[in-house]
Image (tube, rainbow, N blue to C red):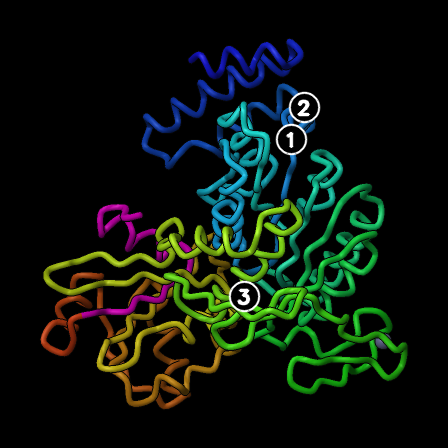
Amino acid sequence: MDENTRHHSKLPMRARVATTVGGAAATVSRLAGKGDGSVIGGVISLRLAPDLLSLLAAGRQVVLVTGTNGKTTTTKLITAALAPLGGEIASNVYGANMEAGLTSALTHAPDARVAVLETDEKYIPAVVRATRPKVVVLLNLSRDQMDRAAEIWLLARRWREALGNAQDCRVVANADDPLVAWAASSARQVTWVAAGQRWREDSWCCPNCGAHLQREGDDWSCRECGGRRPPVSWMLYEDEVIDPTGRATKLDLALPGRANRSNAVIALAVAEAFGVHTGQALRELRKVTSVAGRYTQVSRRGVDVRLLLAKNPAGWLEALDVIAPPPAPVLLSVNAQGPDGRDTSWLWDVDFRRLRGRNVLVGGERRLDLAVRLEADEVALKLVNDIDEAVDAARGVASNLEVLANYTAFQQYRVALGRVQ
Ligand SMILES: [Zn+2]
């Protein structure tokens, strides 16, 4: 209560009323059992004071993190990497990433001088205008299930316009993703990071002129307009980060997989922009062991179950890189409710052949779609009805079970396993 009172005195009356009402709604939402309440709390605040986000961001150093995949993890890693600055850091750790979620994150950390905010791709132009960020992080841009390629290009164009108009803003961008590089290149200051691009199906054409891109390894260039991959100052090489001075340091993260190592390199580049030394930031990154349940291990009936969330084709490819080797069985699970996208045809964009010869279980509401897809890739499978059937199938074969699920399927398993963090 004291914290709120202190903070409220800094805001104009209209914003003070709005945050109070929003806070009450968040409490009601929590009591009603609808998650952490950050979305509904924020929505009501915004309706009462549309400029609330600007008011709440004023005087703070804001980092915005966006991209199709890896936003939540990278937001958490950046927050960790900035810990050596001392003091509280505002962040929307539960992934509520539209204007309302951002408002809520700032309201709940009134004294934080630094804010690290995961931001939905489509909200970036509005949120850049409202928060005047110190740093904007652009990770990658590819189709989500519901998007079409043309929408991705339009989004890149809007980022480009917004960043071109932003004053005193440093962009930390993935040079390996041509669409991201094109969007970032309008900014006044860019730190280029070689963060890799696992999914290339949406970037065969030059974002600048539409010609076919030449690609060789991670390098890309356009013969028509001369556009090319910018020279990078940070890169990942196996398990080492190479910093702008050329020094290599072992990452040694607790989080698994190449995608997370790339996200960590981005976090180090952001930390540098805040004057935090790489060694100090890295010590904090190594302490991060899970991200809102995305890489969490929980024991169920004697089996170690690890949950991985993958929401779109690029995310599934990354997750397949991360799963533990045999004999651990793999449970794949797909739903097609609103947040997942109703159409499961994206499954045909993912190459499942690497699962051949493994013990594969298939669950979720659309398990038959997934089974048909896997059979086309000649992957043998067994259908299961719920997480416990999968755990029982795993027991006796291995001590662990790898679970890969899309959004609502993941949430259902999380609830079944006791809403693990
Ligand atoms: Zn071109």
Single out the residue that lies furthest toward the right: 225
- Measure the C-alpha gap from mark 3 to mark 2: 33 Å
In the rendered structure, the answer to whether residue 10 lies left or right of residue 419 reads right
Q: Are marks 2 and 1 in contact (CB under 8 Å)?
A: no
Q: Which residues are magenta?
A: 400-421
How many residues crowd mark 1 within 10 Å: few (<14), some (14–19), many (20+)?
some
Q: Position of residue 87 (x, y in %)?
A: 50, 31
In the rendered structure, the answer to whether residue 332 lies left or right of residue 183 reads left
Whether the residue under disc 1 has CB within 8 Å of ligand 1: no
Q: Position of residue 410 (x, y in %)?
A: 35, 57
Q: What residue did someone put label 1 on?
A: 60
Which secondary structure lies at badge 1?
Answer: loop
Numbered badge on residue 333: none
Whether the residue under disc 2 has CB within 8 Å of ligand 1: no
Amino acid carrying mark 3 in the image: Ser
Q: What residue did someone put label 3 on?
A: 262
In the rendered structure, the answer to whether residue 20 lies left or right of residue 336 reads right
Whichever of labels 3 and 2 marks the residue nearer the N terminus, that label is 2
Q: Is residue 417 magenta?
A: yes
Q: What residue did someone put label 2 on?
A: 55
Q: Residue at x 28, y 84 (%)?
A: 358
339 in relation to 31, above or below? below
